[in-house]
Amino acid sequence: MAPEGLPIIAVFVAVAAILWWIWWPLGVIGAALSLWCVWFFRDPERAPAPQFVDDPRAVISPADGVIEMIATAPPPAGLAMDAVPRQRVSVFMNVFNVHVNRAPLAGRVAAIAYHPGKFMHAAADKASDENERLALRLALADGESVAVVQIAGLIARRIVCRVKEGVELARGERYGLIRFGSRVDVYLPPDAVVSVAKGQRVVAGETVIALRGKA
């Protein structure tokens, strides 16, 4: 269970109890919503497929959901990265997906940039530039970088980043979450080759979304 969800679950349960006391059919609805809230904040253990566990070339998905788009775009501002366009893989999460986000590669958190913005549908291409978002740059051991951007959506109004600059993250390590439906963009290293397709379902910490050209 993601710890950030515990206060919200407590509120759902308390409201359900009050509704049950007022009129039991309302309590049933409240109980159902409470169970959904518990399901939303689940945080299962994850690992890449066995053939990729020890493969440093594998870039794993930072989020559960569907590959919404694969495009070429310059990295986000505020991360001290060059403006050369990179392959960007976007994962859209609905309210039934696990919302805990994970590092796609092992690296040091070199920069974090928060951008206030709109709350339009996260599946829209312009959400990358106009929605509220938090971008993180991981400096990799070979000198390259990967950027991961948590993007708020229509319902998501709370982006959580658990790490600070200077922290070392292992590949697949949890670093944050977004509450109630959103999107995560990954700006891949230049030598990475995308291994997923638009519309494909992916699992955070398990699905390999790209393979780097260098071991």
Image: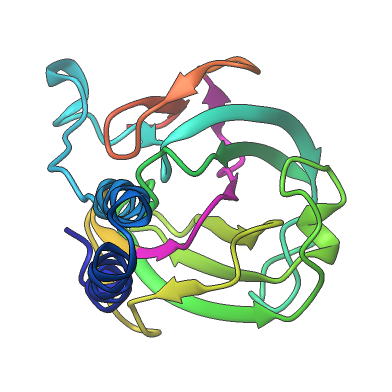
Instruction: State yes or no: residue 133 in magenta.
Output: no
* 153 versus 115 height, above or below: above
| Position in image of residue 205 (x %, y %) | 28, 39
Q: Report how many numbered discs are placed on residues in the image.
A: 0
Q: Nearer the viewer, residue 196 or 189?
A: 196
Residue that lies at the very extreme toward the front in this rendered image = 23
Q: Is residue 74 left or right of residue 110?
A: right
* 185 versus 54 height, above or below: below
Picture quadrant where residue 89 is located:
top right
* 50 versus 146 height, above or below: above
| Position in image of residue 147 (x %, y %) | 56, 58
Q: Is residue 110 left or right of residue 141?
A: right
| Position in image of residue 104 (x %, y %) | 38, 46
Quadrant where the C terminus is found in the figure: top left
**Picture residue at 85% right of the left edge, 64% below the top:** 130
**Picture residue at 43% right of the left edge, 43% below the top:** 63
Q: Is residue 93 left or right of residue 100?
A: right
* 1 versus 92 height, above or below: below
Q: Nearer the viewer, residue 182 or 20?
A: 20
| Position in image of residue 184 (x %, y %) | 56, 49
Q: Nearer the viewer, residue 181 or 213?
A: 181
Residue range (magenta): 176-194
Q: Main structural element of the magenta stretch: helix, strand or loop?
A: strand
Quadrant where the N terminus is found in the figure: bottom left
Its colouring scheme is: rainbow
